[in-house]
Amino acid sequence: MIKINVQVNCNNAPKKEFIKNFNIAFATGNVASFLTHIDENIQWTIHGDKTITGKKQFQDEIISMSAFTADEITIENIITHGAVAAVNGTFSINRKSYSFCDIYRFKSAGSLILKTIDSYLLGAKKSK
């Protein structure tokens, strides 16, 4: 079972709550439940690796990633302003630890539909 640590309070902040749950879904391999919140023309850039374009390619990528569920995730910060949000934290898979930061752009300030995601990943070092 995954250990989930959230360092931020998301009360009364729907976008922060969405970002928190979206990241937990990634860590648990359940992000497919969020596909209704993905724009048809999504662009997901995993810096230093690849760019995924379009909802179908996004879906294919998350299905392939779902085989790698985290042992633990810690969400350190979630920042939102208008149509942009950012999250950072750490996660571990098979005793390897990673740090991440994701920048999200929504269709509009009032929307929960993601247009772009920029992902930055650092790691892996052996966890204790």
Image: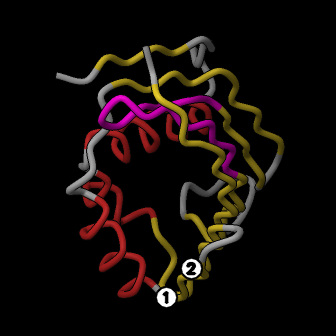
Number of disc labels: 2
Identify the image quadrant of the C terminus.
Answer: top left
In front: 62, or 104? 62
Residue highlighted by disc 1: 54
The part of the image, by quadrant, that contains residue 44 is bottom right
- What kind of residue is marked 1? Gly
In front: 16, or 110? 16
Q: Is the magenta stretch mostly helix, strand or loop?
A: strand
Q: What crowding class fits label 1: few (fewer than 14 Cα within 10 Å), some (14-19), or many (20 or more)?
A: some
Identify the image quadrant of the N terminus.
Answer: top left
Residue 25, horizontal then vertical, whole percent: 33, 43
Residue furthest to the left in view is 1
Residue 65, horizontal then vertical, whole percent: 31, 62
Q: Is residue 111 above or below residue 14?
A: below
Label 2 residue SS: strand
Q: Give the range drawn in magenta.
A: 89-102
Q: Is residue 27 magenta-colored?
A: no
Residue 92, horizontal then vertical, whole percent: 42, 31
CA gap between label 1 and label 2 equals 5 Å
The part of the image, by quadrant, that contains residue 120 is bottom right
Residue highlighted by disc 2: 42
